[in-house]
Image: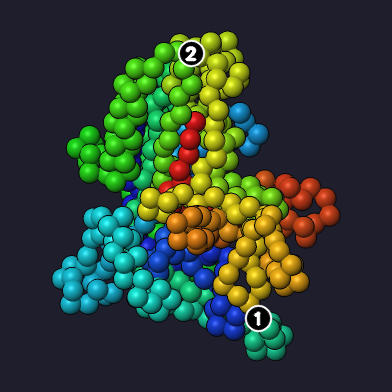
Amino acid sequence: MKQWWLEITLKSDLCTASGDGIAGLVDTEVTEENGIPVIPARRIKGNLLEIGKEFQENGILIEKNLLNNLFGEIGSERPGLLRIHDANLYFIPKSIMGNLGENGYYVKDYENLQTEMQKIMKMDIEQVRVKVLELFTRMRTRTAIDEKTGTAKTGTLRTMRVIRSGIKFRSLLEIDENDLNFYEKDLEGKIEETLEFCAKGLRHIGLGVTRGFGEVSCQLVKLEQKEQANCFLIKQREMINEHFDEISRELERYRKEDNVSVQFDIQLLQPLLLSGKKGLYEDCESMITGKAIQGAMAGAYIKKKMKQAGVPHEDKDFLRIFLRDGVKFGYGFLKKGKCYYYPCPSSIVKLKNEDSCFNRVYEKGDTARKRRKSINKMIVLDKIENQIYLAVPEKEMRMHHARPLDRGIGHALGDRVETNQEQMGRFFQYVALKKGQVFGCEW
């Protein structure tokens, strides 16, 4: 696994818009986690790719397919080599820390910071979130001027929340060496050089870059083997590999014809996007579907076995596991503590304006006349206490901006043009499951 830190230093105030706002107060909010600002990975990837295209057009990057191999290509059956994580808080300047840090403060363990934040927020989640957000951000107000009158145009006053300049963020970039099996053998030596070019060329991120916002400087720092051992994500993967080794040794005790059930948990290290019933951009699934797990496992198998297997569907193990139902992949349901939460059966309903619920299968005359409502949540049935515990997976909304294919157009036009809407860029939001949650699965 090849890994780099992309260090992003803010030279001016930055707005990584979340697509949300506060009516009458803030028109554009920044993306944040528990009040701590973040730069979404999608935003970073788009900006790096845009810089790469500029270099390519100016003859600095000669290889035409290099960017497609690195970042991916629309409609391609193969994903891009580069995996980008959200940029998290890394350095807080003295201007914000005050007397708490003589030369500023480095956040060496971001995951631990978020864990402590979650403990504090149990007291008063909204008040703590707002206080922390105010520490790292400030408000900027702007308007449009009428050229003829020299006064502000009616209805153009906008308030935008921005991240304070001087703060430094850090994003983890990864390339799995197994993925290189898909591409040319001599590509590996050009990857780091291309990333260096893109990182050094990245000068602006976010909204209002033509108005003085979003000026940044970036540095690519390669992770050595010792540093990888201290990385939170690497520690997680090592624990997972050790766990699967234990399972493999345990399965050796069974005969090939035996049916064996294996339970495992999936922890979300990044937000997860799964299309819901209302579509990709309207809703997100509240559970991880078996089909999604099967597809992820099949992709991982192909990456690891591609050299030996050749064509996947000709490999006997691939056929047995993924194409002939040798393994049945179950759904992943929300897990909190030691409890697994499942979708509430439609027969169990709640009496309106009451805390009690009942099963309509055993409905009697006294409840048939009462008004009831469906329970559209995940539940755990406690038969001993005769109670139902409810839970809802945490979700978040994020904004995505796809630029037009014609790079001379600076912003998405989308449905404002009658023809070639897809080629004119899109501006939309999507809903995803928040990172940090755990889902229990079985196969």
Q: State the residue position of label 2.
A: 257
Q: State the residue position of label 1.
A: 156
Q: Which mark is residue 262?
A: none
Residue drawn at the location 76% of the way across and 71% of the way down: 369
Could you tell me if residue 428 is visible in this image?
A: no
**Vertical order, 107 against 290 (above or below):** below
Marks 2/1: CA–CA distance? 71 Å
Residue drawn at the location 53% of the way across and 64% of the way down: 18
Residue 271, how many percent across, how many down? 48, 51
Name the foreground residue: 116 vs 250: 250
User: Which amino acid lies under the numbered mark 1 shown in the image of this protein?
Assistant: Thr
Judge from the rendering whether residue 230 lies leftward or rightward of residue 69; answer left or right: left
Residue 400, how many percent across, how many down? 59, 55
Name the foreground residue: 54 vs 242: 242
Judge from the rendering whether residue 265 lies leftward or rightward of residue 320; answer left or right: left
Residue 268, how many percent across, how many down? 43, 47
Q: Quadrant of residue 116?
A: bottom left
